[in-house]
Amino acid sequence: MNFIFLSPNFPKTYYHFTQCLKNNGVTTLGIGDEPYDQLSQECRDSLVEYYKVSSLENYDEVYRAVAFFAFKYGKIDWLETNNEYWLLRDAQLRTDFNVTTGLQNQNIDGIKYKSKMKEYYAKAGVPTARYHLVDTLEGGLAFVQEAGYPVIVKPDNGVGAAATYKLRNEEELRNFYANLPEVQYVMEEFINGSIVSYDGICDSNRDIIFETCHFYTEPVMDVVNKGLELCYYSRKQIPEELRDAGRRTIKAFDSNSRFFHCEFFVLNEDKAGLGKKGDIFGLEVNMRPPGGYTPDMMNYANDIDVYQIWADMVCHDKGFFDPEHRPYAAVYGSQRKGKNYAHTREDIFARYGQNIVMYEEMPEVLASAMGDHAYMARFATDEELHEFLNYVIEKKEG
């Protein structure tokens, strides 16, 4: 099997994907714009061959790299980045080289454009927030008449919470239209809900191989725009209503043989015309691993190797692990520079050193979304997890 992995060096932990593929006997071929000698040793060791391009944004150059590998090694069986930013690039290359193990141009829209996702959620029987494709000020005002303030505006084709804003009144709405971005935006009614994600790996029939869930204390939009701490956690058991909505969603989307990250709202209160407290609403679907160090968090929570599970899905269309073994609840908590925290890093390690499985000072490019100082820990109970999280983000009085 010939597998091309684009940008195998970013994020830096992604060498685990190619490493596990290579361990399974796959011919792992990398294409990236980083010089070979600047790749980590682990990344270099995980690849049979690496082709450097001047920029992954240059389609012709990347096309020639794929063509070179196809000439040298034969038909390309898989082509992947596991990175949301390159979804359209992946689909175009698969289309051009007839790689049928992933999404091609004709079926990429449903997981790339937020407005198109609504159709698939409807197919799954999962409700979503009302929305409007941003066009004119008059159209926006008419939508607000129906949905009320605040509203959320975000790129129809966007990564994460980038360029996402909450408009609270007509003045902010008019200002948004006065400075309307050139890209297509979506306007959605605001949902007062907690964000949860349903994450995992499915096989070629969209049946679940591995599944878990994560709960976010604040929306990523607010973490980025307001400088809040990113904090989220997994539970040992997936709530049954979330599992049901997640599985129906995966069946409805073009999700064959994928790592997936599905985001949902759980209503915090009743809302007329929308639903009851506790109801689940679809937010968006990403056919990639959840961001940051979440795959590693899955490993620590479940004593597994999701990179190997993914590689086994690629090679065997199944996993070789015990899905019932879920010994820990895991948590990611962060601190930001310039805030007056009650507890230092030394305090946190003195109290929770036996539970902490990772600590990292985040690079500036990731700090706005992930915090400056990141802690990951695991606990036998949810109660211990929340005590840890409160301890990390507690501020000094005054």
Image (cartoon, grey):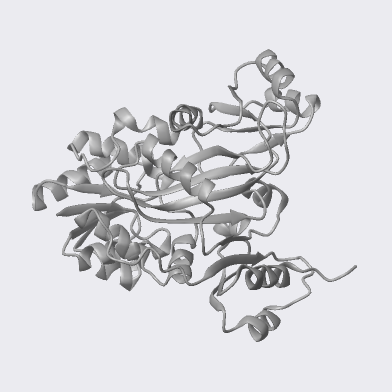
Q: Going by the picture, which residue comes out furthest to the front?
A: 240
Residue sitting at 42 percent across and 39 percent down? Answer: 248
Residue 145: x, y in percent?
A: 74, 18
Looking at the image, can residue 62 be seen?
yes
Residue sitting at 50 percent across and 28 percent down? Answer: 115
Quadrant of the image containing the C terminus: bottom right
Quadrant of the image containing the N terminus: bottom left
Query: In the drawing, does residue 6 fall left or right of residue 156?
Result: left
Q: Tell me the quarter of the picture where residue 16 sits.
A: bottom left
Seen from the viewer's position, the closer of residues 338 and 323 is: 323
Residue 339: x, y in percent?
A: 77, 65
Q: Going by the picture, which residue comes out furthest to the top?
A: 138
Seen from the viewer's position, the closer of residues 107 and 34 is: 107
Q: Tell me the quarter of the picture where residue 251 sits.
A: top left
Residue sitting at 48 percent across and 49 percent down? Answer: 243
Query: In the drawing, does residue 293 fall left or right of residue 172?
Result: left
Looking at the image, can residue 181 be seen?
no
Residue 279: x, y in percent?
A: 62, 40
Query: In the drawing, does residue 359 fall left or right of residue 340?
Result: left
Q: Tell me the quarter of the picture where residue 189 sits.
A: top right
- Identify whether 17 is placed above or below 180: below
Query: In the drawing, does residue 30 fall left or right of residue 290?
Result: left
